[in-house]
Each structure stands twice: as structure tokens, then as C-alpha cells.
Image (cartoon, rainbow, N blue to C red):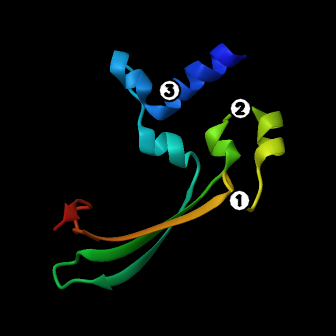
Amino acid sequence: MVGTYAEDMAGLSGVDNLWGGDTNEAQSLLGSYAVKYEVKSVDPDGSLVVRYTLTNDTDMESALPGYWGWQERLNHDRGPGRDIKEAMTWTERIGPDGEPRE
């Protein structure tokens, strides 16, 4: 089990990239997440100004994917290793052709 865990963590952490892996570390950490969007305005050229908000909970499910027993034992709301609630917000301008604009 320790060997399997070490292999899993190498992939999740991106260490596998040292020997040709293709891990996306941001995706590995975020795992599943929710994204909401709101059209803030429409420019005269038809471009949309859109605000996105991504929310995610990082907890033992993020650190120990697939190890359900350990997740249940180690998930908690206080102290070191507690669940972290994350929110990221950004705004993009999208042209009438669907391509991002500066």
C-alpha cells in the first residue's frame, strides 16, 4: 500500500514530470470544482465582459484520493490539515467570435 500511495502522490504532485509524466498540478490539487459566471456587460462591438467564480474545497479527499478510510479518519474542520474553502474570481472579455479579447 505504501508503494501505491507513493506512486499516486508522485503523479498528483507533478514529480512524475521529472521522468516524462504529464501531470497538471493545478488540476490535481483542485480536482472537482464549481464555476459560476455572470455577464457583467456587453461592449459596443458585441464582446461580453464575463466574471467567473470558481469554488473548491481542499480537504483530505484532495490529499488522499481513493483512500476513503483515511479520508474519513483525517477530515476535520479545525487545526492543521483542516479543510480549506477556496474561491477564485476573474473577469474575461470574450469577442463575438467566441475568442478571448484583451
Query: Residue 21's spot in the image, x, y percent?
Result: 39, 21
The residues tagged by marks 1 and 3 sit, at their Cα atoms, a distance apart of 27 Å
Q: Residues within 10 Å of mark 2 (few under 14, many from 20)?
A: few
Please tell me which of labels 3 and 2 falls first in the chain: 3
**Three-letter amino acid code of the residue under disc 2:** Gly
Camera-side residue of 89 and 81: 81
* Residue 32 visible to an observer of this rendering: yes
Q: Residues within 10 Å of mark 3 (few under 14, many from 20)?
A: some
The quadrant where residue 43 appears: bottom left
Secondary structure, mark 1, is: loop
Q: Which residue is mark 3?
A: 11
Count of numbered tags: 3
The quadrant where residue 99 appears: bottom left
Mark 1–mark 3 CB contact (< 8 Å): no
Secondary structure, mark 3, is: helix
Q: Which residue is mark 1?
A: 79
The residues tagged by marks 1 and 2 sit, at their Cα atoms, a distance apart of 23 Å
In this rendering, is residue 73 above or below 91?
above
Q: Which residue is mark 2?
A: 66
Query: Residue 4's spot in the image, x, y percent?
Result: 65, 17
